[in-house]
Image: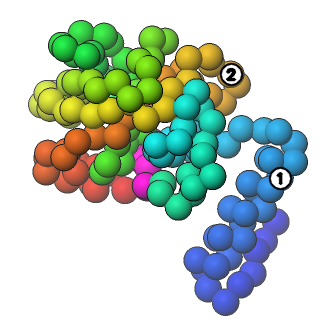
């Protein structure tokens, strides 16, 4: 299928809207929408303004540890953005929980702090169990790393 428009960006928007409509009509999940980080997302459901506040995500699996007091639970990242990340885990924490994270960036542990903004405790096809985390003032090292992935 080909989408034609006045610009490449407009054609891409048409293609994205076509895919979203197709999936909504068939009740299918969009994998990249698991990564949207919005305050209204709870248990994997997006709020009405999800598209307007979504940040660019890069799919990347990295080992990560997380916890409320100490980052002792083991998980992995599903994706990263400059403002947040998705933690794949069978034990996601409740929405609005503040947590500490220890991310292994090529054998350089980096401590992060953030809030759980949404969680998915029940895995389904195309939806990993885990939680979307909004980061508090990510260190420059983290932001630079994410930029190099894009």
Q: Residue 140: give x, y in percent of width and height.
A: 13, 51
Q: Residue 20: give x, y in percent of width and height.
A: 74, 54
Q: Is residue 12 magenta?
A: no
Give the camera-side residue of 115 and 13.
115
Single out the residue that lies furthest toward the bottom.
6
Residue at 59%, 32% (x, y): give it: 44
Residue at 55%, 31% (x, y): give it: 42
Single out the residue that lies furthest toward the right.
25
Give the camera-side residue of 4 and 23.
23
- The magenta stretch spans which residues? 55-60
Q: Are marks 2 and 1 in contact (CB under 8 Å)?
A: no
Secondary element under disc 1, as helix, strand or loop, is: helix
Q: Earlier in the sequence, mark 2 or mark 1?
A: 1
For label 1, the crowd category at 10 Å Cα-Cα, with few meaning under 14, some 14 to 19 and many 20 or more, is few
Q: Which residue is mark 1?
A: 22
Give the camera-side residue of 22 and 62.
22
Q: Is residue 133 left or right of residue 12?
A: left
75 is higher (above) or lower (below) than 146: above
- Quadrant (top left, top right, bottom left, bottom right) of the C terminus: bottom left
- Quadrant (top left, top right, bottom left, bottom right) of the N terminus: bottom right
51 is higher (above) or lower (below) than 145: below
Give the camera-side residue of 71 and 6.
71
105 is higher (above) or lower (below) than 100: below
Residue at 76%, 74% (x, y): give it: 3
Residue 33 visible to the viewer = yes
Q: Residue 124: give x, y in percent of width and height.
A: 68, 22
Residue 106 visible to the viewer = no
Mark linked to residue 124: 2
For label 2, the crowd category at 10 Å Cα-Cα, with few meaning under 14, some 14 to 19 and many 20 or more, is few
């Amino acid at each position: 299928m080909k989408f034609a428009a006045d610009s490449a960006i407009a054609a891409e928007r048409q293609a994205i809207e076509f895919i979203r409509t197709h999936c909504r009509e068939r009740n299918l999940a969009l994998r990249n929408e698991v990564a949207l980080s919005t305050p209204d997302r709870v248990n994997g459901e997006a709020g009405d303004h999800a598209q307007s506040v979504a940040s660019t995500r890069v799919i990347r699996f990295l080992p990560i540890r997380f916890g409320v007091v100490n980052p002792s639970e083991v998980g992995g990242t599903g994706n990263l953005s400059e403002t947040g990340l998705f933690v794949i885990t069978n034990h996601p924490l409740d929405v609005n929980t503040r947590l500490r994270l220890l991310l292994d960036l090529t054998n350089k542990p980096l401590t992060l702090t953030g809030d759980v903004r949404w969680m998915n405790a029940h895995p389904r096809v195309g939806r990993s169990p885990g939680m979307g985390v909004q980061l508090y003032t990510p260190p420059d090292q983290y932001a630079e790393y994410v930029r190099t992935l894009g």
